[in-house]
Amino acid sequence: MSLIRSLADVVRDREPAAPVEGNQKNAISIRSLNAYYGSHQALEDINFDIHPGVVTAIIGPSGCGKSTMIRCINRMHEVVKGARVEGSVLVDGEDIYGADANPTRIRRKIGMVFQKPNPFPTRSVYENVIAGLRLNMPRKSKADYDEIVEKALRSVALWDEVKDKLGASGMALSGGQQQRLCIARAIAIEPEILLLDEPASALDPTATMKIEDLLFELKSRYTIVLVTHNMQQAARASEITAFFLADERHVGHMIEHGPTRQMFMSPSDPRTEDYISGRLG
Amino acid sequence: MPRVNEQGRFLRRRAAGLASEIIAALLAALSVAVLFLIVGHIIVNGLGSLNADFFTKIPKPYGESGGGIAQAIMGTVIMLIVAAAIAIPFGVGTAIYIVEFGRGRFADTVRFAVELLAELPSIVVGVFVWALVVRNLTGYSGIAGSLALAVIMIPIIARSVEEILRLVPDSLREGALALGSPKWKVVIFVVIPTVLPGILTGIMLALARAAGETAPLLLTALGNSFFNYDLRKPMAAMPLQIYTYAVSPYDDWHNKAWASTLVLIAIVGILSGAVKFATRRWKHESH
């Protein structure tokens, strides 16, 4: 119990995380979602709501389906060969798995940052930031692009570090800078929702802190879902936490979810407590 | 006792390690020596016949001294350009289909067919083009030669580009897809630029191979002792010219065969060197 206490102390002291009723813009509702890789079921019957204005963390041991979960929110799951999804994900009340839903349009509204920084190696820092605009949006003037690049890089606290090397390759940056560049690239197309799949797992503690601080800044503008296997990170950076766990058939389930503080101090399911206190996974 | 044993084993291991290193180095030296032997021989025998006329004049009948292989150089260049214009889109397109879009049995079949095509002896390609194109449509002609070379180049390009596309990490494709890009844009604007040097090298490899092909050209382009820029007529090519000179009974023509070989090797070498240089600079700039 003392371990749980110490983790709970990490939870930032701030207003209760209860989402503001009425402000349901960019809310995500996941309804009886099942995800498969070929014949293997990775997620079973997931139901929960993700609220705007707060950071929602998904935690759980490796193989519990937490990455699969967020990949279902922007239809990236189906990119994998043989992968498919049943059920629905409602964004602003609209089912992104509806018959007339367009995956590429959905992904422009729902940005994603991956575990390993993946800047485009042939593009400069500048071109990486506006890659999404260049690829998928109507052409803009150079001045507009300049403004967008500066704004996006400032949002991720990278502008001062790279403003003199905007023409350098994105690969020339450090790992932490690359990851912030990828976040800048994701927010440059002005999505409404930002999904982060273990964004700091390949980074050192200093770079990790910067990313977490960044989430704090960004959550007022985007609905943020953060997948992490690092419980301290969930405790530090999120208001809502969902705990996922795979059963003996390796099918992922959501065990419980709730305000982060409550999840870490008094989880209602013994398995959550086991995981958080280090006895599981 | 165990100490002595240990010492002995240590020495044995070192000896075995050293021996295998020496053997490997020796074998490597021998295989490289073969290359140097061939190139050296060609240079020694060919250099003497090289002069300005050799690059600017057409062959002279036997007995007259001088003359060159300009028409063969031109023919090879023209047929390679036409063949490349056909083979590059088909080869690169096939590779992109297999790696980026193909799913299920059809893609596997295409892949297998490309592999088979790559292993087809080039004379078979010649016979095929002869039967289908030369006999029915064009007669012996530059275009038939170009087609034969294209058929040889397509599987080489397809296979090397396929290998190279598989080196592109999926994380890059996913990064672009997650920005809301349709698949075709991901391929054209993210995947291909990332491996462009490798793709050019693959194309270069195919060009080098096609430049040296003789058998399929014998049955299609036939050869020509005069300048010809008309793809509908028989066209000269360097390997054909080398063949003509080499099988002749004349010493002068034998020397010219060596000289032609030297020019062919030099052209291929310069081309691939230029591609390497360009792609290295390109890589340099992007890193």
Image (cartoon, coloured by chain):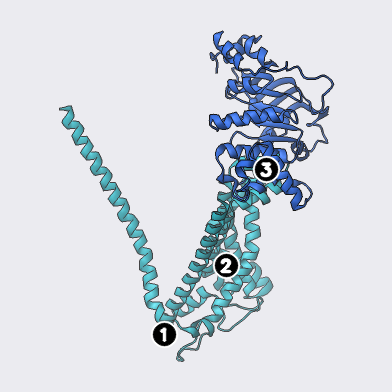
Q: Quadrant of residue B216?
A: bottom right
Find disc 3 in the rendering and name its residue.
Answer: B176
Q: Secondary structure at mark 3?
A: helix
Residue A132 in view:
no
Q: Amino acid at mark 1?
A: Asp
The mark that comes first in sequence, 1 or 2, is 2
Q: Nearer the viewer, residue B227 or A31?
A: A31
Give residue B104's position: percent from left, percent from top: 65, 41
Q: Is residue B182 left or right of residue B134?
A: right
Residues under numbered marks 1 and 2 in contact, where contact means CB atoms less than 8 Å apart = no
Q: Nearer the viewer, residue B141 or B192?
A: B192
CA–CA distance between discs 2 and 3? 43 Å
Of tags 3 and 1, the one toward the viewer is 3
Q: Amino acid at mark 2?
A: Gly
Residue A19 in view:
yes
CA–CA distance between discs 3 and 1? 62 Å
The mark that comes first in sequence, 3 or 1, is 3
Of tags 2 and 3, the one toward the viewer is 3
Q: Say which residue appears at 48% left-offset and 67% top-offset.
A: B269
Q: Which lettered chain is shown in cyan? A: B
Find disc 2 in the rendering and name its residue.
Answer: B126
Q: Which mark is residue B252?
A: 1
Report in which chain the residue with disc 2 lies.
Answer: B
